[in-house]
Amino acid sequence: MREEQFIRAIKRRKRKDQWYFVFLLFMGFLSLFPLFSVLYYVVSKGWFDLFSAGFLKPTVGTLEMVLIAMVFAIPLGTGLGLYLYESRGTRMVTVVRYTADLLSGIPSILIGMAVYAVVVISTGTFSLFAGSVALATFSIPYLGREIEDQLIASTSAIKEGALALGATNTRALLQMVMPVMTRPLIVAILFSMSRAMGETAPLLFTTLGNHFWPIGLMSPASTLSLQIYFDALSPNSFVQSQAWTGALILIAFIILLFLVAKWITREESK
Amino acid sequence: MGKSLVVESLSAFYGKQQILYHVSMTMPEHQVTTIIGPSGAGKSTFVRCLNRLHETTPNARMEGSVWLDHQNLYELDPIIVRRKVGMVFQAPNPFPTRTVFENVAAGLRLNGIRNKSIISEQVEKSLQLSSLWDEVKNSLHQPVWNLTRGQQQRLCIARALAIEPSVLILDEPASTLDPLSSLKIEELVEELKSHYTIVLVTHNLQQAARVADLTALFLDGELVEQGSPAELFTRPKDKRTEDYLTGRFG
C-alpha cells in the first residue's frame, strides 16, 4: 500500500471514530434524560413546602417501617444466604434458591395481599407492623441471594485457608469469612432499604395510611409513598402539590442511601 | 516433625465424574515429593484428599485410605487431620481483615491457644522458618495488603507452619508469583524439609527436578510413574512419561 493511501485510510477511520463518539454521547444523555427530568420536576414542584410540619408524620412512618422491616430481614436474609452457600449442591438448596428468586421477583402487590390475609386479618387491624412484614417479605430473598453471591465470589479461598488450619466450619465462617463480608453486606442492606422505602402497593393492604400520628406500631400509619399516592389522587390542587414535596423527600432519602453505598464500595476498591 | 504419608488405592469423585483412579504412593518423611502433570490431571484433587479438604466441596467423595504414621486419616476427625497436614494454596490467601501477626496466629487461636507469650513466640518462629521475619518484624501489626504477593505467599506458609503440622502440602505455590519470589519459595522448600514431609505440586518441570527427592507424574487421574527425578527425567520407564516430558502432549 502506498503512503498516501495509508494516510487516507487512517483519516477515514479517525472520522468514523469521532462520529461514533458523538453517537455514544447522545445515547448517554438520552438515558440520563428521564432521571434528570424527574429530579427537575420533583424539585421545582415540591421544594417550597419542604419544611412544613405536615411531612413529619409520613417521614417518621417510612423510617420506622423500613427499620422494623430490616430488623426481620437482616438476620433472616443473612441466615438464608449462609444456608444457600453452605449447602450448595444439594437438591433442597436448588429448590430454596428458585423459590427465593421467585419471591423477590413477585409483584409486590401480591405480597401485600398475602400479608393482609395473614397479619391484618389475624391481628384485626391495619398497622405499621403489617407494612413492615410486607417489606421484609421481599427484602429477605433479595438479601439472601445477594449474600450468597458475595460469599461465592469473594471468600471461598479465605474459607479454605481457615479450614486448612483446622478451623471448624462454623469458626471459619464466623471468624474469617464474615469480617470480609461486612461491606458487601452493608451495601446490600442499603439497596434493599431504598427499594423498601419506595414501595406503595403492598402498604395499601397493610398499613392503609393515616392523617394522624399512629398510636403505636399496631395502628394504621402514614408513609411517604402512601402520602404521595393519596395526595396525588386528591382533586384539591394544594393537596396535589404536597404529593410533589413528599416525592422530593423520598428521593432525597434514596439518593442519600445510594451515595452512602457508593462511598463504601469506593473505599473497598482502594 | 515430619512423618511419612502413605496413600493406598485412592479414588476421588465429583458427583458421578471420577477424577482419580486407584492412586497408591508413599511420600517419605523429611523428603520433598513433587507432583507433576498437565492441568486437569488430578494433582490438586490428590493433595486435597491428603488433608481432607476435598470432601468440603459439594458432591465430592473419595475411596481408599491415607496413612500418616500408621494412623488412617479417614478414621480421624477432619479437623485433627488438617492440624497434622498443613496446606498452602495456589494463590496467596491471607485473611484480608487481619494483620500480619494475626494471620500467623490465626491457626493457633482457631485451635484454642490463648497464652500470649506462646502465641508471639510461635509467630516469630514461623516467620523465621518462612524467611519472612526480617522483612516484616517492624510491621507485624500492619494490614496484610501492604505485603507483596511473594511475601503474602510466604506469610501463608508461616501461617501453615505455626500449628506445627507433620506434613506440608504446597499446591503450585509459586505459579502466580514472579521468578524471584518463586525462587525464594523454592529455597524455602529445601530448608523446610529437615522439619517436615513436603508434598509440592508444580507445573514447572525444572522446579520439580531441582527440589524433589521423589517425583510423581499424574495423567488423566492416574499415577503414571514415580521415582527419583534423575531417573524419571532421564530414563522414564513409561512411554507416556517420555511423551509428556518431551512435550508431545499436556
Image: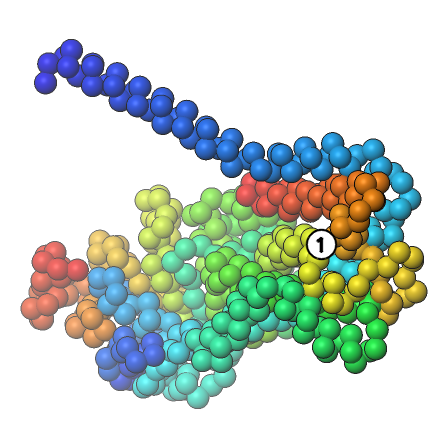
Would residue B185 appear left or right of A82 to someone viewing this image?
left
Q: Nearer the viewer, residue A139 or B95?
A: A139
- Name the quadrant containing residue A69: bottom right
Q: Report the side of B39 relative to A151 (left or right).
A: left
- Residue B132 vs B54, above or below: the answer is above
**Host chain of mark 1:** A
Tell me the element at label 1: helix
Along the viewing direction, whichever of A152 and B185 lies nearer the viewer? A152
Residue at image x 17%, y 60%? B250
The single residue placed furthest to the top in the displayed view is A4
Identify the residue at image location x=65%, y=38%: A38
Residue A126 picture location, percent across and down: 81, 69
| Quadrant housing residue A106 | bottom right
Q: Residue B56: x percent and y percent?
A: 45, 75
Provide the residue designation for mark 1.
A197
Q: In the displayed image of the protein, which residue is found farthest to the front?
A: A235
- Along the line of sight, the residue nearer the viewer: A241 or B27: A241
- Left or right of B170 in this view: A55: right
Looking at the image, can residue A59 be seen? yes
Which residue is rendered at x = 42% and y = 83% of the image?
B73
Specify whether residue B158 is in view: no
Q: Quadrant of residue A76?
A: bottom right
- Does A71 sit above or below residue A225? below
Residue A267, position as x, y percentages in the image: 61, 42
Q: Quadrant of the N terminus of chain A?
A: top left
Q: How is the image coloured?
A: rainbow
At horizontal 32% and vertical 85% (from top left) the residue drawn is: B63
Look at the picture and state if A193 lies above or below B87.
above
Q: Position of residue B31 (x, y in %)?
A: 32, 68
For disc 1, the neighbor class at 10 Å (few under 14, some 14 to 19, many from 20) is many
Placement of the C terminus of chain A among the 4 image quadrants: top right
